[in-house]
Image (tube, grey):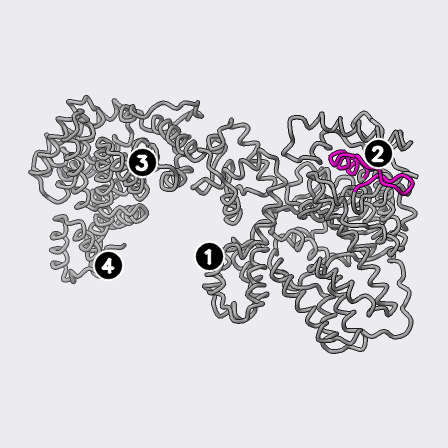
């Protein structure tokens, strides 16, 4: 007689004698086919089972060689027809009783548990090695333990507890987190008169469960522990063991509903909605989310809440798609479990999956049943388990979005809100959480508001009475390994990704910025944009990424750390930084075409860059990527920083991103000093000088501008345009501080340099400032001519923002000449252009000019107030001071002395910091109004 053993060493046994000489790889292939007996297994699936992603080039030929060798052995044993070739692959068809694993399943179903367990001669698949073996071994070990637990339950009921103790203790040592097994040991010890040992065993299980999984024991175990502590008479044997009836047709198989379930009010409302059912059909609701998000807890909780609506059965099965070391439960096995839960006798359950599925649908017809299909792999995994025409509600949980499950309603679960996360933590921890609210918030932040992470952290604190919440927060900051349970869940999700998705996930962990789009991801990975988008969408469907806005992908903080722990940089961040450089340049060429010449030193990209179609797309891309570009410059490789600063400077300046400008130009300066690149040093100093001038930090602006000119003086190249920019900054500062002669000297030098370098745009900028100086010197006609020329030059090069600057300056000159209506018209034009361009900082200047040209103080108050709001938004101190100055004068004209004094003092404080002559004028105004000139505390920070 031929027999196959899988529950121990994999062997072919003929007439009681094992056959020798079968290679380990051949036995691994044979075992896989026998485990899937009756199903056609394709060669690709066999290759996957043997090697996973690490398949050799010879995989296909090795499988063919194994099949040939197996057939040769079968032929010698007289079992030629046991392994057949079908259209889709190979199918093993052993006879009843030939495979010990099949016999084990039948004996367990028949209740012959001791005979079933006696079939085992070691670990399942003990001496074979293949990719699939670990998971299958764990699955069959679980089945063996389940059978053993049932056997022990009967032995305990029969009063044979003393005979079980040694064997039970050994089993618990091997499987310390099996709740039922631990419960049997506790009960056996108690009945043996060893109450202290029983309580010690219960405590050991409780501690191990908290440490490993952040959970408390279930209700049944807790009740057993309480009963042992109280020496409850109900635990003693009272006469003959009762006969355990077969499970009724209408049963509840739902797991324990955790008592500290918190939050999810909106999700619970959606899941409890009566309108899930389509007419005549079942309701199918999918619950998806990242690992540790609480999908199972939510499904079980809502199932308990809805249980009364489904009197004909509340079923539950863990499909184990994301269970470490286990293969997903296939349709046939899942249907067998569900049919048994419905009360269908084992003898009525057919063999083939198709017949089981048909019986499942027939049994559900006319019944109101709730079924939770937990931990599904994908839509194909659960499709055979869906009912036909029925009043059944099916709740499916999965880490992947089951987008192709027709007719299902989807619910994607995110992290807990702050209040919900705090409630969960407090319900587990208790009073200690109330005493340290700030520390609680820090713990929740470190846990990323992820329920699993919160549970693990809270359980750790609960079982350590001397710890404070602050101490826990410190431990989490320094030792994120305290959340190893979360990492394990993430690791399993990662392992189930395709190889290309795994690589993208790892590379994204290197990205310094907060998010990325498909173009950036393509550059990071060195692949096409279409390929990158497909991978990103796959990671999104697997809940390994988040999408907070269309087209942009980011991580949950804990997943980001996990990705970073797996990542190795193969030059990916350098590719990303290079992409940012070239795309920034393309965006600037669209936005600022008149400065293209300044970027000629940036080399062209070696690979094509996605084109920037127009100015609107350029601004949208820059607004989305600005913080990512800066983060990559700060934390990425120190390459091309000078070129990146050169590319980004017009956008950072015009859009008032001055903090980012300081960061980027300072990086360029530091790197250029390391490399000894005087040109980049001088340009970085020039850009820093302009940025400090824009912020009203005039002393630092002058200092950096002078340093820049010193560097330019040592450079043998002309660089007239850059020298002119440094001189323009010095002229601006001198003009603001009332040093008019010095300002004129700097500005005339700058003007000469722009004309020498044929820099039309630079010439227009210098002419605009020079006009203000001429107007202040009492030469308004000359100032007007300069402004007219500057306006014409800006229009010639196509710079609308430059036009707005000149229009604003024209308004100032016209107001000083008493032409208020024309002045207001120019300021209004300038403000409209700035608004259209999104240039908030300069719009504040135009609004202040508009208010200064108002003939009505009430209108001036309104317009200065609007200017102040924009200046506050962009930290534009010169315009903040100007707005407060104007508000003081307008309120004084309206008779509001108190408000005039308040704004006057704020203006005085800011002007004093800026070191400009307007401070004395405001002081005179305050003294004339009888108000104190002392600025209020904190005025400079407003």
Give the residue displayed 39% in from the left and 39% down from the top.
636
The answer to whether 577 appears left or right of 892 in the picture is right
Q: Which residue is mark 1?
A: 477
Instruction: Tell me, yes or no, if residue 833 can be seen here.
Output: no
The answer to whether residue 660 is above or below residue 302 is above
Q: Which residue is mark 4?
A: 899
Mark 3 against mark 1, which lies toward the viewer?
Answer: 1
Q: Which residue is mark 2?
A: 92
Disc 3 residue crowd, few under 14, some 14–19, many 20+, Cα 10 Å: some
Q: Is residue 29 magenta?
A: yes
Q: Which residue is mark 3?
A: 832
The answer to whether 216 appears left or right of 743 in the picture is right
Please provide percent x and percent y for residue 215: 63, 61
Instruction: Tell me, yes or no, if residue 99 can be seen here.
Output: yes
**Badges 3 and 4: C-beta atoms under 8 Å apart?**
no
Q: Which region of the structure is painted magenta? A: 10-34
């Amino acid at each position: 007689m031929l027999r196959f053993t899988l529950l121990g060493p994999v062997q072919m046994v003929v007439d009681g004698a094992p056959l020798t000489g079968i290679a380990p790889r051949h036995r691994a292939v044979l075992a896989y086919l026998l485990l899937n007996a009756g199903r056609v297994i394709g060669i690709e699936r066999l290759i996957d089972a043997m090697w996973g992603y690490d398949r050799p080039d010879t995989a296909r030929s090795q499988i063919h060689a194994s099949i040939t060798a197996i057939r040769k052995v079968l032929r010698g044993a007289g079992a030629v027809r046991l392994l057949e070739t079908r259209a889709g692959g190979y199918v093993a068809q052993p006879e009843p009783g030939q495979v010990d694993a099949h016999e084990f399943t039948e004996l367990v179903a028949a209740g012959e548990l001791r005979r079933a367990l006696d079939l085992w001669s070691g670990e399942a698949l003990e001496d074979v090695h293949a990719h699939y073996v670990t998971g299958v071994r764990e699955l069959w070990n679980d089945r063996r333990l389940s059978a053993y637990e049932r056997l022990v339950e009967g032995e305990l009921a029969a009063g044979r507890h003393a005979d079980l103790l040694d064997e039970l203790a050994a089993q618990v040592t091997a499987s310390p987190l099996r709740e039922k097994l631990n419960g049997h040991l506790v009960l056996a010890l108690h009945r043996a008169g060893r109450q202290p040992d029983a309580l010690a065993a219960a405590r050991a299980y409780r501690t191990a469960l908290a440490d490993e999984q952040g959970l408390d024991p279930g209700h049944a175990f807790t009740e057993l522990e309480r009963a042992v502590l109280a020496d409850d008479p109900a635990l003693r044997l009272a006469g003959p063991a009762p006969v355990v009836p077969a499970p009724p047709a209408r049963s509840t198989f739902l797991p324990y509903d955790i008592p500290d379930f918190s939050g999810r009010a909106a999700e619970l409302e959606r899941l409890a909605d009566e309108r899930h059912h389509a007419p005549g059909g079942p309701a199918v609701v999918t619950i998806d989310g990242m690992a540790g998000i609480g999908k199972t807890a939510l499904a079980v909780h809502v199932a308990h809440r809805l249980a009364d609506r489904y009197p004909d059965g509340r079923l539950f099965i863990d499909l184990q798609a994301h269970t470490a070391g286990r293969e997903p439960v296939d349709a046939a096995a899942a249907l067998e479990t569900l049919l048994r839960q419905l009360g269908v006798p084992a003898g009525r359950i057919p063999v083939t999956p198709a017949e089981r599925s048909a019986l499942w649908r027939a049994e559900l017809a006319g019944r109101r049943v709730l079924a939770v299909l937990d931990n599904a792999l994908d839509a194909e995994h659960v499709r055979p388990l869906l009912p036909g025409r029925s009043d059944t509600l099916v709740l499916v949980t999965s880490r992947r979005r089951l987008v192709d499950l027709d007719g299902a309603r989807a619910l994607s679960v995110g992290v807990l809100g702050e209040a919900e996360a705090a409630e969960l933590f407090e319900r587990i921890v208790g009073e200690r959480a109330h005493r340290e609210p700030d520390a609680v918030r820090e713990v929740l932040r470190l846990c990323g508001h992820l329920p699993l992470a919160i549970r693990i952290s809270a359980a750790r604190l609960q079982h350590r009475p001397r710890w404070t919440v602050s101490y826990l927060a410190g431990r989490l900051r320094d030792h994120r390994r305290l959340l190893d349970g979360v990492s394990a869940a993430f690791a399993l999700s990662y392992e189930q990704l395709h190889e290309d998705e795994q690589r993208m996930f790892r590379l994204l962990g290197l990205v310094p910025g907060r998010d990325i789009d498909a173009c950036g991801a393509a550059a990071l990975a060195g692949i096409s944009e279409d390929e990158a988008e497909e991978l990103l969408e796959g990671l999104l469907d697997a809940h390994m990424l988040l999408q907070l806005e269309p087209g942009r992908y980011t991580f949950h903080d804990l997943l980001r750390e996990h990705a970073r722990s797996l990542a190795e940089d193969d030059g990916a961040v350098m590719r990303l930084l290079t992409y940012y450089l070239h795309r920034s340049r393309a965006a600037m060429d669209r936005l600022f075409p008149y400065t293209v010449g300044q970027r000629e030193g940036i080399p062209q990209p070696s690979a094509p860059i996605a084109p920037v179609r127009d100015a609107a797309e350029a601004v949208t891309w820059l607004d989305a990527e600005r913080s990512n570009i800066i983060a990559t410059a700060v934390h990425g490789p120190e390459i091309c920083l000078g070129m990146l600063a050169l590319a980004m400077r017009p956008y950072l300046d015009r859009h008032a991103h001055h903090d980012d400008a300081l960061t980027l130009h300072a990086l360029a300066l530091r790197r250029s000093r390391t490399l000894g690149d005087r040109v980049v040093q001088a340009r970085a100093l020039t850009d820093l000088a302009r940025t400090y001038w824009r912020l009203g930090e005039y002393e630092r602006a002058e200092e950096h501008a002078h340093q820049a000119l010193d560097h330019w003086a040592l450079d043998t190249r002309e660089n007239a345009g850059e020298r002119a920019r440094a001189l323009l900054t010095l002229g601006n500062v001198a003009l603001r501080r009332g040093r008019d002669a010095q300002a004129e000297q700097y500005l005339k030098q700058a003007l000469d340099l722009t004309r020498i370098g044929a820099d039309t745009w630079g010439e227009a900028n210098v002419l605009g400032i020079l006009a203000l100086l001429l107007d202040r010197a009492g030469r308004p006609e000359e100032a007007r001519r300069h402004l007219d020329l500057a306006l014409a030059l800006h229009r010639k090069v196509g710079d609308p923002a430059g036009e707005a600057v000149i229009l604003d300056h024209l308004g100032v000159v016209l107001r000083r000449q008493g032409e208020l209506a024309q002045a207001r018209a120019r300021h209004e034009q300038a403000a409209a252009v700035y608004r259209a361009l999104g240039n908030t900082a300069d719009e504040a200047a135009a609004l202040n000019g508009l208010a200064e040209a108002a003939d009505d103080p009430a209108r001036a108050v309104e317009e200065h107030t609007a200017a102040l709001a924009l200046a506050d938004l962009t930290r534009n101190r010169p315009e903040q001071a100007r707005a407060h100055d104007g508000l003081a004068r307008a309120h004084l004209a309206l008779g509001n002395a108190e408000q005039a004094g308040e704004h006057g003092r704020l203006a005085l404080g800011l002007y004093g910091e800026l070191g400009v002559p307007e401070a004395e004028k405001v002081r005179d105004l305050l003294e004339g109004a009888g108000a104190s000139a002392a600025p209020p505390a904190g005025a400079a920070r407003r």
